[in-house]
Image (cartoon, rainbow, N blue to C red):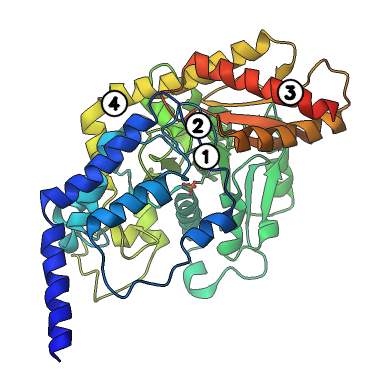
Amino acid sequence: MSAQLDRSAAALEALEEDMSSASGALFVDLIAGYFSATRDGDGQVSTPRTAGELAARFADALPGEGKPLADIVRRLATDVIADANQLMHPMSLGHQVAAPLPAAVWSESLIGALNQSTAIWEMSPTATVIEAQLVRALTRLIGWGDEAGGTFTSGGTEATFSALLAARAYAMPAAWEKGVGDEPPVVLCGEHAHYCVTRAVAQLGLGGRSALAVPSRNWKMDISALREMLDSLAGAGTNVMAVVATAGSTATGSFDDLAAIGELCEARGIWLHVDGAHGASALLSPAHRHRVRGLAYARSLAWDAHKMMLMPLAAGMLLVRDEADLAQAFSQHAPYLFHGARDERVWDQGTRSFLCSRRADAIKVWVGIQRYGVSGLAALYDVLCDSARALHELIAARDDFVAMHEPETNILCFRWVGDRSLGDGALDAVNLDLRMRYNRAGHGWITTTVLGDRRVLRVTVMNSRTKRGHLCAMLEELSREALVLAER
Ligand SMILES: *Cc1c(COP(=O)(O)O)cnc(C)c1O
């Protein structure tokens, strides 16, 4: 019994000690040190070690006794940060994950400290209203009316799932109780849509084959193909539950023509969902806003603040033109949680969300917008897109690479072609190996994809520290490595 008392006394003492600013400063110094160590682009961008090697590092048994916080923070530096992907490094040009806004990073610990669950207002009196007001302020950029609203989500995947659930409730109000039956409606999306669309269609019980791919032209939804498909479905008496357009596609960052798609959907009374996980932040930028012209036609929009608004993971949003659509989507009663009055707007975001316990991610987004302002975020959006444009120019000035498309945002796909003496198949192999080799060397980090059956290299600029010189250095190293591979 007394051993147990000793243990609890020690644990309670550790808790109090860890609440001091001296303890917090250990983390502040660690993180500020990481920010500064990555500034000049010395050091590796990613780890040369395998998953197995890293797993061995963390194979020790669970510790029986606690350790001093300072020891653990030291291990975070040597064992975690050192082999993590250094997204703050200017040569980090990989996936669509941000070098996060520092003010939002610091806010993460406040979100944890307050630990407000935003399922219901009574558990999060300030965070819930911040979320609701922020979402509504963003809907005004689209030009929607006062009925618009939405919810934070874990990301674009949850947002698109919830949007299509709302579209299902609209098209088939009985589906929540009775299921979708034998002849479910179909959902149309571009052939280059993110996989979350077909995943949502299958999750909603419509059957994966109810997701129909509209062919692309220049990596965007082909409008005449969409019109023909809608006509032939109407002719066959097949109901269309939704059309999903993409604003900033994953592979090439291309924007579908939302005005043309929106007009088609409006004329036929079809729900338009826009997957703007990547590109909806163009709304903030006067220079790029034209990319999402026609967005007001949408009934729902997925928008990830953790993409081009540069928030740390996770901060996704689902905005809807009529907030009542979302409440309909989740038409469930939970008397132990939700007991708002019938006639007024319910503040509890849990009534509009897939999740129950929910982080107050809205706080860090609010801090980020307060700190940098809409114009600051727009400027950062423009800077990242300008870097992709600069890379496109650098490639155009060389013979040994070709760009696959004009960059519409911060993403560019290109291909090493050397002196063009190799065939397409051989070039596919070189480009695939090239990416592996380049990333393993540690000076930079890029991705790859397949476009029109050809293996290509892919760069996403998510870091405002990346300058033209870094892009030149990347092309130089890629070209040196490619020549070695081509001669093998
Ligand atoms: C990133 C992305 C998604 C997925 O969003 P998550 O936040 O990763 O869930 C969906 N669609 C597009 C176009 C994206 O860029």
Decide which of 155, 270 is in the foreground and name it: 155
Mark 4 near ligand 1 (CB under 8 Å)? no
Q: Evaluate if marks 4 and 1 touch, with contact meaning CB atoms under 8 Å apart.
A: no
- Residue pictured at 55% horizontal, 29% vertical: 443
> Badge 4 is on which residue?
374
- Marks 3 and 4, how far apart at CA: 38 Å
Q: CA distance from mark 3 to mark 2?
A: 19 Å
Which of pointers 3 and 4 lies earlier in the amino acid sequence? 4
User: Is 272 placed left or right of 414 in the picture?
Assistant: left
| Local secondary structure at mark 1 | loop
Mark 1 vs mark 2, CA separation in Å:
8 Å
Residue 92 badge: 2
Count of numbered circles in the view: 4
Rendered image quadrant of residue 321:
top left
Considering every residue shown, the one lying at the far bottom of the view is: 1
Question: How much space separates mark 2 and mark 4, taking CA atoms?
Answer: 25 Å
Which quadrant would residue 438 be assigned to in this image?
top right
Marks 1 and 2 close (CB-CB < 8 Å): yes
According to the picture, the residue beneath numbered tag 3 turns out to be 416
Task: Work out whether mark 1 precedes mark 3 in sequence or the reverse, and give the earlier one.
Answer: 1
Residue for badge 1: 46
Assign a secondary structure to mark 2: loop
Residue 3, image x, y percentages: 17, 86
User: In the image, which is nearer the foreground, mark 2 or mark 4?
Assistant: 2
Q: Label 3 neighbourhood size at 10 Å, few (<14), some (14-19), many (20+)? A: many
**Residue type at mark 1?**
Ser
